[in-house]
């Protein structure tokens, strides 16, 4: 990546977008090729989900991660487009395209995970099961994606940076989708690990925090990870407002995350035992301290937050930490099997299969392909 | 219109699993993917170990969380019988119902076989079916819109209370009792096979049904009342009115 | 149609079918006219109904013989349910019953007769089977048999069989052996099954048989190692009984269960006692001690001191004056020397049946105890040798003494004894857990003696004998077809290959199949030439079967199983049988509730492969034997002809369900007469007079039917043991002074290890095939989660001391072999014992069983047998356990 060329302000679209696209396509080919090979040869048997209790595996983790990243990025973009925070203008368009890329990557994974994804397309809207959070999630994600696509259609190869009216419902949808995504878990009263009215709020904060991390990371990526290449206003944003917002959201995330863990450890409710297991796992502490506490400190201290490499590091840590947290949350909520007796252990163990890892590679590859192609051919990185 | 329910008497249940295997054979289940399972638990130490078991069919809740979460209404409550069914034509395999079922009684098709080598490979499908055991139920019983038959790829299945049997019962009968020659063939497999006669099946809406009498006389309880799912499966454990688990929040 | 009228018509329908449904059992479901269709407008417009046919059969997966309804639609068998009108199944099934279709459609079944092309035999040798015609197969067998006979070596043909069913299969063996001339036709598997209970009962009760039981009326059951809710036959009916006596009967029957590990039986009982293996007899003796010391015995059956003063004082002899009169002159011990009468069931487990015509209706009164002047003498009613037993053995067998041996606290033993002694009716039952040990004969006698002390014999809520069915005569009498060789050939000079009934072997045993392999290997008493197997697979099932793997390399082997097996892997000829759903086969009941019953398997579908019913294979071979023997079998024709002749007996004696000929037998699947005709009430034996038990039986009748012992009573002092005391003393070193009593004898454990290896049968063990049924593999061991394999239950302390973690692979090693399995921590198993269900470890029996990673406990089990009962001591081995 360090070979990327300078794309200082005003410079024409660089070759490095093409390069980025090539790398992304390679990832897509590797991940997608492997997954499709497995699915066509063996079927979903290759995934490590089981009827013993782990129904939603890594694929759902990846899907939700990409979905929430997408909605968060729209929220960040809306700071400029809807809420008029001029400072965010330099990253707003990038965020929108990244949001689109993320939703494509996420939905692709979901389609490969679902048993009958194409049935979902007609059966969901036609049956109006309004009691189901997933019904709303499907509809809202569809509407959100459509609006996002529509908005971006208007931005192809223009340098126009004004917000359109569509931005307002789109932003509203981003918020609602995020909240509904939280409700999918938060409404599950039979699973205390997930249950709670705070979950949608947690999702909202995490979504926004993640999006800031992605904004930082991809802005640096666009500049070849060279702080010096960055536009002054972007640099200012990253050292100032955005860093503060980032720090605040990380701080909130820390409080909510630690709060859930402490509550979980204390609680006797069936299903909460999983917190003992989670907290005993080094991965939890890596995410908690390495991926939340450390970036928080790095973003709070002026000396560190103004350092480009440290911004990249903090963003990267938050991106990884969020994936771990999402994984612990979704899998952990299922690890204590409901009513399984001696056939199932007291705690189910799960780790993603190669095929499920490949889904992540696929999603990363696909999302980056979309973004890189957009940057290369559709003017995603062109600005007025 | 009956509201079919089941009573399971734990005082006489011997933990033999005949309900499990009879159900599995009647409904073409894959080995170990039990719509009706018997769960075993043990606690305590030698020489006084408490070994216990619980037969667990689908609770056929009146207020089923699986139905509420299904984004396509593939899971629904059948009006005539009160049975919770899955329409395999509509099921998208999102497994949200499995996540939301407090009793763990739903099964996705595309999982690794419990017993190797895979029976699906031994009795391979014929294009129409995912597998084709020679002992499968008669074609006439199969009904994908109710989740009866050979489970297709990518969908979730569950206990149907042997819908293909009970739905044929003459209307108005209070109980489907395997010992009554008139109702034998309409009795769910798990009830019919039960050697100690620990299972009873009848109409909860009929005040004269034997299941209602048992629930009243022996203090029937439902599992996990706190979820508010209102199961239609009641358990007896030998007692009269004072009974052990969750009698709280029996809201109507 | 308007809804209200529809409802009315539905009710009318119900009323109508209430009458017709009871009168006729619909043989066809869902076609017009059977009442199962068109019950409503919805049903009329509903989907088409399958054209389902129900045939009657009986399950083959355990000995219980449950009547089953087999549902067949469009040539596919798709469901099996219990037959409603069947006294054993009563419409219910055990977990194995519904799985029968997996047996029928087992993809590993033999497709037709085959011969071996690879002369080398061994576990790793491919037999190289090639298909042949049935004619070639049968001619090959007959040719060998004729040659042997011509060479004067007919004794070198042996026929080994396991689960015989009835007159049309194993029932043909007796005549075949007689006519052909071999002492080894046929050798049953009963010594590898449960002869320990049959023979120990015979020693005290006289009848060499399992008992039938009146569980439904009993108020207390004391169980010793029976697995009542796992394996004890008839399992399905036992569970029906359980539902009644534990849920619906008043008063609720109390149950104490004794075993070495926690299982469903113990868990469902009121009290679980985890006993040290092989010590059940000590517990029984202590219970007897308490019953006598506290005066709790049933006086009307046992008798009493004539002055009513209890002189059974712990630690003290009862004064000599109290001992009973001397032993009456013993009669012949060999009650069963008479050849099995055709067509009576040559019961595979030695269960003799009392023929109905053994009844003599007369009204001679029985002798009661003679009231005497009060001298302190013990007047014995229906028992013999009680005071002597006390003086010689029981007086010191206190609960404290037994507590040391059994690990069961003395106070618990006392409580159990008082419960058992004060609750009537009560019964004590036992099986292999108690008697598959070196001291099994005495454990069995001691436990069975408890039944005498509480007067359980033939009492309501007690135990009795099993009556046989009213079969008609066979198409021909084998005695008319005996040639000179059959009558006088020198084959009669040879002992059986297993030395059953021989002084050098097992004089008092019924069978010794477990020694056939080792004896042949040693050429002692001789070498066999040809062996045929029916429903038995001893290469795998025999203890230390590795010896058989070596032994059977030089014998011509014919296997008749429908399935591949280890014995089949050694076969030179495969003559595959039908599976049970394809057979026409009779089967009189096992000891059940005493009343006579016999059942019929009716084929549900045409055989799906080129197979032949074993009974017909035997008849076809017989037809090809030179001389009058061939004539006899031509006279029999085939098994259907045999069954038609047997069914003629029903004409004069129709069953309760109206079965009076072959056709009605086929339709109903069972002939039975519910009334059991003997009953002991308050110490007097009665016969049924048609309305009541009112005809008192004479002591002679009691001796003939109830207690065929030398004294005609239940013998604590066993006359049968006493008659053989010289032989017993010589072969076992036991003391002739007390060896005839139920005494305590320390069990001897072979194998050289420090942990008892116990290998029980589990509920899902479908005989001969469970290991290859995926549905069984998924559910085999629910108590500890054994799915896909069988775990070895090991106490956590025992495991940790050997550095074994939960789920580790472990090695179980004895002097004879070593096997590898997966360990599972279990607090329900004794720390000095490991428990591994006998199920897996098959290496040539099918795709699923081969894939199971559990090896076979039998390969670490030492082949030692009880010298008296012949029982293979499956549970007496001690093994070392290490991390694999």
Image: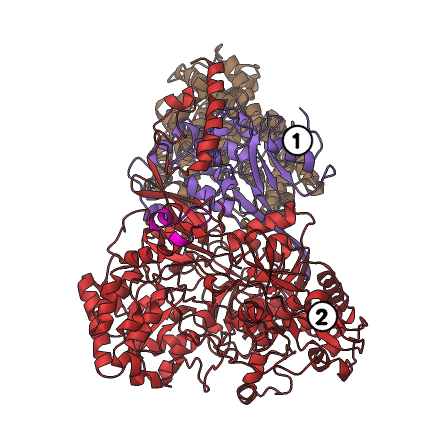
User: Image check: B62 left or right of C38?
Assistant: right
Whether residue B99 is visible: yes
Image spot of residue C341 (x, y percent): 39, 68
C665 part of magenta stretch: yes
Looking at the image, is A146 positioned above or below residue A111?
A: above
Tags 1 and 2 both on a single chain: no
Chain B, chosen colour in render:
purple
> Residue lying farthest top?
A165
Looking at the image, is A329 positioned above or below residue B250?
A: below
SS at mark 2 in the image: strand
Q: Nearer the viewer, residue A206 or C586?
A: C586
- Residue that label 2 marks: C303
Instruction: Point out the stretch of residues depicted in magenta.
Output: C651-666
- Residue that label 1 marks: A252
SS at mark 1 in the image: helix
State the image quarter where residue C703 is shown.
bottom right
Spot the brown chain and give its letter: A
Chain C, chosen colour in render:
red
Report crowding for label 2: few under 14, some 14 to 19, many 20 or more residues within 10 A (C-alpha): many
Q: Nearer the viewer, residue C372 or C432?
A: C372
> Dot 1 falls on which chain?
A
> Dot 2 falls on which chain?
C
Looking at the image, is C664 positioned above or below residue C427?
A: above
A367 part of magenta stretch: no
Report crowding for label 1: few under 14, some 14 to 19, many 20 or more residues within 10 A (C-alpha): some
Looking at the image, is B85 positioned above or below residue A347?
A: above
Image spot of residue C687 (x, y percent): 57, 60
Give the Cα separation between the discs numbered 1 and 2.
Answer: 88 Å
> Residue lying farthest front?
C363
| Disc 1 + disc 2, Cβ < 8 Å | no
Residue occupying the point 34% across, 51% down: C662
Q: Nearer the viewer, residue A239 or B207?
A: B207
């Amino acid at each position: 990546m360090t070979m990327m060329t300078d794309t200082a302000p005003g410079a024409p679209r660089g070759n490095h977008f093409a390069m980025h696209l090539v790398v992304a396509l390679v990832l897509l080919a590797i991940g997608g090729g492997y997954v499709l090979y497995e699915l066509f040869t063996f079927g979903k048997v290759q995934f490590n989900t089981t009827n013993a209790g782990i129904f939603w595996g890594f694929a759902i983790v990846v899907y939700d991660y990409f979905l929430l990243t997408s909605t968060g990025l729209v929220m960040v973009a809306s700071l400029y487009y809807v809420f008029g925070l001029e400072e965010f203008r330099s990253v707003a368009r990038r965020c929108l395209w990244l949001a689109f890329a993320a939703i494509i990557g996420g939905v692709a994974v979901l389609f490969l995970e679902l048993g009958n994804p194409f049935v979902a397309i007609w059966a969901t809207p036609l049956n109006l099961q309004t009691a189901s959070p997933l019904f709303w999630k499907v509809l809202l994600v569809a509407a959100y994606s459509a609006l996002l696509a529509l908005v971006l259609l208007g931005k192809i190869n223009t340098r126009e940076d004004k917000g359109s009216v569509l931005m307002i419902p789109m932003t509203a949808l981003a918020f609602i989708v995020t909240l509904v995504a939280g409700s999918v878990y938060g409404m599950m009263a039979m699973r205390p690990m997930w249950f709670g009215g705070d979950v949608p709020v947690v999702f909202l904060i995490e979504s926004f925090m993640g999006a800031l991390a992605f904004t930082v990371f991809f802005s640096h990526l666009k500049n070849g990870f060279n702080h010096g290449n960055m536009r002054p206003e972007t640099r200012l944003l990253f050292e100032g407002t955005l860093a503060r917002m980032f720090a605040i959201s990380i701080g909130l995330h820390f409080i909510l995350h630690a709060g859930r863990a402490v509550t979980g450890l204390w609680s006797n409710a069936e299903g909460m035992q999983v917190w003992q297991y989670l907290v005993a796992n080094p991965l939890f502490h890596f995410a908690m301290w390495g991926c939340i506490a450390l970036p928080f400190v790095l973003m709070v201290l002026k000396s560190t937050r103004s350092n480009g490499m440290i911004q990249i590091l903090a963003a990267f840590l938050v991106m990884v930490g969020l994936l771990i947290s999402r994984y612990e949350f979704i899998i952990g909520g299922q690890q204590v099997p409901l009513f399984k007796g001696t056939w199932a252990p007291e705690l189910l163990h799960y780790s993603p299969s190669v095929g499920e890892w490949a889904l992540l590679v696929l999603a990363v590859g696909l999302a980056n392909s979309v973004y890189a192609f957009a940057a290369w051919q559709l003017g995603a990185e062109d600005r007025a | 219109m009956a509201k079919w329910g089941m009573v399971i008497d734990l005082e006489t249940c011997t933990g033999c699993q005949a309900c499990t295997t009879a159900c599995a054979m009647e409904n073409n289940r894959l080995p170990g993917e039990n719509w009706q399972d018997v769960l075993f638990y043990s606690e305590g130490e030698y020489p006084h170990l408490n070994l216990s078991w619980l037969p667990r069919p689908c609770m056929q809740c009146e207020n089923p969380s699986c139905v509420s979460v299904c984004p396509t209404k593939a899971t629904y409550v059948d009006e005539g019988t009160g049975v919770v069914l899955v329409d395999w034509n509509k099921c998208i395999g999102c497994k949200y119902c499995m996540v939301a079922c407090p009793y763990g009684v739903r099964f996705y098709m595309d999982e690794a076989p419990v017993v190797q080598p895979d029976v699906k490979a031994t009795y391979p499908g014929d294009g129409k079916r995912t597998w084709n055991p020679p002992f499968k139920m008669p074609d006439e019983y199969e009904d994908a819109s109710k989740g009866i038959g050979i489970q297709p790829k990518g969908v979730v299945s569950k206990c149907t209370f042997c819908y293909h049997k009970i739905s044929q019962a003459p209307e108005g009968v209070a109980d489907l009792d395997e010992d009554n020659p008139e109702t034998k063939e309409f009795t769910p497999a798990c009830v019919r096979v039960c050697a100690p006669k620990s299972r009873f099946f009848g109409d909860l809406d009929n005040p004269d049904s034997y299941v209602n009498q048992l629930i009243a006389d022996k203090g029937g309880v439902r599992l996990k009342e706190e979820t508010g799912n209102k199961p239609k499966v009641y358990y007896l454990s030998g007692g009269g009115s004072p009974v052990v688990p969750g009698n709280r929040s029996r809201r109507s | 149609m308007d809804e209200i009228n529809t409802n009315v018509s539905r009710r009318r329908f119900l009323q109508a079918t209430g009458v017709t449904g009871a009168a006729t059992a619909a043989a066809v479901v869902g076609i017009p006219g059977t009442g199962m269709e068109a019950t409503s407008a919805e049903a009329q417009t509903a989907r088409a109904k399958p054209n389902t046919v129900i045939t009657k059969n009986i399950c083959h997966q355990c000995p219980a013989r449950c009547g089953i309804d087999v549902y067949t639609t469009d040539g596919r068998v798709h469901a099996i349910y219990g037959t409603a009108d069947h006294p054993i199944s009563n419409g219910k099934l055990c977990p194995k019953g519904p799985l029968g279709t997996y047996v029928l459609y087992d993809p590993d079944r033999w497709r037709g007769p085959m011969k071996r092309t690879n002369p080398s035999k061994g576990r790793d040798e491919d037999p190289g089977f090639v298909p042949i015609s049935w004619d070639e197969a049968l001619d090959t067998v007959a040719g060998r048999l004729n040659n042997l006979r011509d060479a004067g070596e007919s004794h070198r043909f042996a026929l080994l069989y396991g689960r015989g069913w009835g007159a049309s299969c194993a029932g043909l063996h007796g005549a075949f052996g007689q006519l052909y001339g071999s002492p080894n036709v046929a050798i049953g598997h009963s010594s590898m099954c449960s002869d320990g209970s049959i023979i120990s009962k015979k020693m005290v009760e006289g009848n060499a048989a399992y008992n039938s039981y009146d569980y439904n009326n009993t108020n207390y059951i004391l169980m010793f190692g029976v697995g009542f809710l796992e394996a004890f036959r008839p399992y399905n009916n036992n569970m029906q009984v359980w539902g009644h006596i534990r849920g619906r009967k008043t008063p609720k029957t109390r149950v104490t269960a004794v075993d070495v590990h926690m299982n469903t039986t113990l868990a469902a009982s009121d009290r679980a006692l985890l006993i040290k293996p092989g010590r059940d007899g000590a517990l029984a003796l202590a219970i007897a001690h308490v019953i006598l010391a506290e005066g709790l015995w049933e006086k009307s059956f046992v008798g009493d001191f004539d002055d009513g003063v209890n002189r059974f004082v712990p630690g003290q002899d009862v004064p000599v004056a109290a001992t009973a009169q001397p032993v009456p002159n013993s009669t012949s011990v060999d009650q069963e020397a008479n050849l099995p009468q055709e067509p009576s069931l040559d019961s595979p487990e030695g269960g003799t049946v009392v023929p109905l015509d053994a009844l003599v209706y007369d009204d001679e009164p029985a002798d009661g105890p003679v009231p005497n002047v009060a001298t302190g003498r013990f007047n014995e009613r229906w028992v013999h040798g009680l005071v002597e037993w006390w003086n010689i053995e029981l007086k010191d067998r206190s609960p404290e003494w037994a507590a040391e041996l059994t690990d069961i606290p003395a106070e618990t033993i006392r409580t159990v004894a008082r419960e058992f002694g004060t609750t009537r009716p009560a019964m004590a039952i036992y099986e292999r857990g108690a008697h598959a040990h070196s001291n099994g004969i005495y454990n069995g006698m001691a436990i069975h003696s408890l039944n005498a002390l509480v007067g359980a014999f033939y009492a309501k809520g007690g135990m009795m004998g099993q009556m046989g069915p009213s079969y008609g005569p066979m198409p021909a009498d084998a005695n008319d077809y005996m040639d000179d060789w059959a009558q006088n050939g020198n084959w009669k000079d040879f002992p059986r290959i297993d030395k059953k009934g021989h002084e050098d072997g097992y004089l008092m045993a019924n069978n010794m199949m477990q020694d056939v392999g080792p004896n042949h290997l040693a050429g002692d008493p001789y070498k066999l030439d040809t062996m045929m197997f029916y429903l038995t697979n001893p290469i795998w099932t025999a203890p230390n079967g590795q010896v058989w793997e070596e032994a059977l390399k030089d014998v011509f082997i014919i296997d008749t199983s429908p399935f591949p097996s280890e014995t089949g892997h050694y076969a030179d000829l495969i003559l595959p049988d039908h599976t049970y759903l394809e057979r026409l086969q009779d089967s009189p009941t096992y000891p059940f509730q005493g009343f006579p019953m016999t059942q019929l398997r009716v084929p549900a579908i045409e055989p799906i492969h080129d197979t032949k019913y074993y009974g017909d294979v035997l008849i076809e071979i017989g037809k090809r034997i030179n001389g009058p023997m061939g004539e006899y079998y031509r006279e029999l024709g085939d098994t259907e002809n045999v069954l038609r002749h047997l069914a003629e007996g029903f004409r004069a004696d129709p069953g309760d369900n109206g079965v009076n000929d072959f056709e009605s037998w086929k339709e109903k699947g069972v002939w039975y007469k519910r009334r059991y005709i003997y009953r002991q009430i308050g110490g007097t034996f009665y016969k049924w007079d048609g309305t009541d038990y009112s005809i008192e039986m004479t002591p002679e009748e009691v001796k003939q039917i109830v207690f065929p012992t030398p004294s005609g009573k239940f013998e604590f002092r066993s006359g049968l043991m006493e008659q053989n005391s010289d032989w017993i003393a010589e072969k076992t070193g036991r003391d002739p002074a007390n060896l005839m009593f139920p005494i305590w004898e320390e069990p001897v454990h072979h194998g050289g290890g420090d942990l008892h290896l116990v290998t029980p049968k589990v509920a899902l063990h479908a005989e001969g095939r469970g290991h290859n049924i995926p549905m069984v593999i998924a559910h085999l061991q629910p108590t500890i989660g054994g799915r896909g394999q069988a775990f070895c239950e090991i106490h956590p302390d025992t495991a940790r001391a050997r550095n074994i973690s939960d789920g580790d692979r472990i090695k179980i090693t004895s002097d004879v072999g070593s096997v590898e399995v997966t360990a599972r921590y279990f607090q329900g198993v004794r720390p000095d014992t490991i428990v591994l269900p006998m199920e897996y470890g098959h290496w040539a029996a099918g795709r699923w069983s081969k894939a199971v990673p559990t090896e076979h406990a039998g390969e670490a089990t030492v082949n030692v047998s009880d010298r008296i009962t012949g029982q293979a001591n499956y549970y007496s081995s001690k093994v070392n356990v290490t991390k694999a």
